[in-house]
Image (cartoon, rainbow, N blue to C red):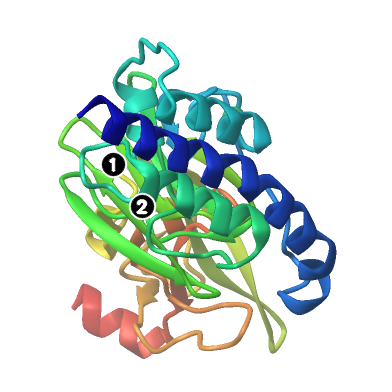
Amino acid sequence: MKKRILASLMSVVMVLTMLPAAFAAELNNSQDTFNTEYKNEITLSYGTDGNGEITEWMLKGDVTRDQHVSYSDIQILEGILIGDEFDWDELEWEAADVTGDNHYRYDDLSALYSMSSGRISLPEEHFTFRIIDKPNDGYWVSGITVNGEKLNVPSVGSSASTTINGAEYKVDVDEEGIATVIGQSLYQNDVEFTHSDGSWYYEVYYEYFEGVEASWIRYENGQGGKAAPSETVAIAPESWNGEELGWDAIDGSGTEKLGTHYVYDPAYPDTDEHSQRLSALCSEATKDNPLKIYYRAALHDVTYEYTG
Ligand SMILES: [Ca+2]
């Protein structure tokens, strides 16, 4: 019995001592034979705009927790298979269990050898990362990018997936707005979170004629309120109809009013620069791209019909 244990231990030791040589040999020529982005390590970096914080991250293979899967991780994992002592926390266990079968075994180490040597290239199903962002009070996650590429951000309490260059990313946002991103690793992964306080903006214009030339005068602009980024926000002419502009109409019909002397017409104006924009996702009704209502100058006989 003892002999068999010793023999199997010896074979493990032999495999382990032989592998680094094979690994080194493969490293030399794999740069040419695999895709140009190939590196023999994985890096995870992350950041936020300051209106949220990263509460957890996990990178498969990174048992040393230095945000790199590299040769030092492999050395530790080799040692453990031949009996080194270890006292891992939950995240270190999860990182070591590359194949995801809830055990740390030789197949996990083998996956790391394959990645490091370029025998498999990323993205690959087992090499993943997880990163969790908790927005500050009053904020929502409004944008997530991986290496500058935008992920779909779902509404609170739901999920969205995005595939970019063959790598899949899943984003879950729970009822409290906490966002969990699970992605397939590339060799470099930079994950950035931006947040919004949910403010959205609007502008109101009326049409002004100087001779026959019409132009649009801004009557009012401001913040419409706050909402979750995925909520639809809207404005309606009813909110401004009846407001007095402060000068008399030339036709003697009294003080000019929105809704009477200037009327809302859904089809006018319709140019690249000017068109009605009564609703949008909160995340898209920004200060730079607000909701808009245009009131066109009413013809005088139309005015009489309105005031009747
Ligand atoms: Ca590491």
- Check if mark 1's residue and mark 2's residue have beta carbons within 8 Å: yes
Task: Tell me the SS state at disc 2.
Answer: helix
Quadrant where ligand 1 appears: top right
The residue where tag 2 is placed is 282
Image x and y of residue 48, in percent = 56, 31
Figure quadrant of the N terminus: top left
Image x and y of residue 259, in percent = 31, 67
Q: Name the residue located 26 percent from the left edge and 62 percent from the top edge.
A: 236
- Tell which of 237 and 45 is nearer to you: 45
Image x and y of residue 201, in percent = 45, 48
How packed mark 1 is, by other alpha carbons closer than 10 Å (few <14, some 14-19, many 20 or more), is some
Asked if the residue at label 1 sits under 8 Å from ligand 1, the reply is: no
The answer to whether residue 199 is seen in the rendering is no
Q: Tag on residue 77?
A: none
| 98 shown above or below 94 | below
Q: Give the amino acid type for the residue marked by disc 2 in the picture.
A: Cys
Q: Give the amino acid type for the residue marked by disc 1 in the picture.
A: Ala
Quarter of the rendering containing residue 133: top left
Q: Earlier in the sequence, mark 1 or mark 2?
A: 1
The answer to whether residue 249 is seen in the rendering is yes
Q: Tag on residue 227?
A: 1
Image x and y of residue 40, in percent = 70, 51
- Tell which of 136 and 259 is nearer to you: 136
In the drawing, does residue 287 fall left or right of residue 285? right
In the drawing, does residue 8 fall left or right of residue 271? left
Quarter of the rendering containing residue 234: bottom left
Figure quadrant of the C terminus: bottom left
- Tell which of 163 and 142 is nearer to you: 163
**Measured Cα–Cα span from mark 1 to mark 2:** 6 Å
